[in-house]
Image (spheres, rainbow, N blue to C red):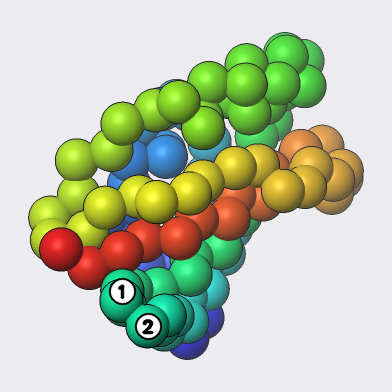
C-alpha cells in the first residue's frame, strides 16, 4: 500500500528524529515467518538546507540503535538503505521490519 501523505506511527517517529524533514512517500507490505508476523515499511524523507548531508549522515548512524515505542509493534530491524538528490532536496530512504506484538 502506498500512502505518500498519511504518516504511520513509524514515519511520525522518524520525522520527530529529523526535524524539518518531510514525508515524501511510504510503502508497507505484510510480512510473515513461521513464528512472527508484521510488515515491511519503506519511508522516504526529504531534507533541505545546506546541512542536509550532515543531518542525513547523523540520522543514518544513530537510527539502527534507536528504540522506538510503537503501539502493538516492535521494530526488529531498521536502516537507511539509500540517499539520493532530487533538486534541492536530499531523499533519505528508511527500510524497517515491524513485528506485531
Q: Residue at x 65, y 42 (%)?
A: 80
Classify mark 2: residues with Cα within 10 Å, few (<14), some (14-19) or many (20+): few
Q: Indicate the position of residue 55 as horizontal and vertical percent values.
A: 64, 18
Q: Image quadrant for the C terminus?
A: bottom left
- 4 lies left or right of 89: left
Mark sitting on residue 36? 1
Give the quadrant of residue 35: bottom left
- 90 lies left or right of 30: right
Q: Nearer the viewer, mark 2 or mark 1?
A: 2
Q: Indicate the position of residue 100 as horizontal and vertical percent values.
A: 22, 68
Q: Residue at x 84, y 45 (%)?
A: 84
Q: What is the tally of numbered marks visible in this picture? A: 2
Q: Residue at x 48, y 70 (%)?
A: 40
Label 1: state its secondary structure: loop
Q: Is residue 4 visible?
A: no
Classify mark 1: residues with Cα within 10 Å, few (<14), some (14-19) or many (20+): few
Question: Could you say which is closer to the camera, residue 3 or residue 57?
Answer: 57
- 29 lies left or right of 90: left
Q: Residue at x 51, y 30 (%)?
A: 63
The answer to whether residue 20 is above or below residue 88 is above
The answer to whether residue 34 is above or below residue 26 is below
Q: Indicate the position of residue 57 as horizontal and vertical percent values.
A: 71, 21
Q: Indicate the position of residue 17 as horizontal and vertical percent values.
A: 41, 27
Give the quadrant of residue 19: top left
Mark sitting on residue 92? none
User: Which residue is label 2 attached to?
Assistant: 34
The answer to whether residue 29 is above or below residue 96 is below
Label 2: state its secondary structure: loop
Amino acid at each position: 500500500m502506498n500512502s505518500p501523505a498519511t504518516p504511520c506511527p513509524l514515519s511520525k517517529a522518524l520525522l520527530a528524529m529529523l526535524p524539518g524533514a518531510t514525508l515524501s512517500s511510504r510503502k508497507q507490505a505484510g510480512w510473515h515467518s513461521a513464528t512472527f508476523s508484521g510488515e515491511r515499511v519503506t519511508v522516504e524523507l526529504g531534507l533541505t538546507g545546506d546541512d542536509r548531508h550532515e543531518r542525513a549522515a547523523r540520522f543514518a548512524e544513530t537510527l539502527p540503535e534507536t528504540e522506538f515505542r510503537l503501539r502493538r509493534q516492535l521494530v526488529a530491524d531498521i536502516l537507511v538503505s539509500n540517499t539520493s538528490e532530487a533538486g534541492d532536496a536530499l531523499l533519505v530512504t528508511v527500510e524497517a521490519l515491524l513485528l506485531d506484538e
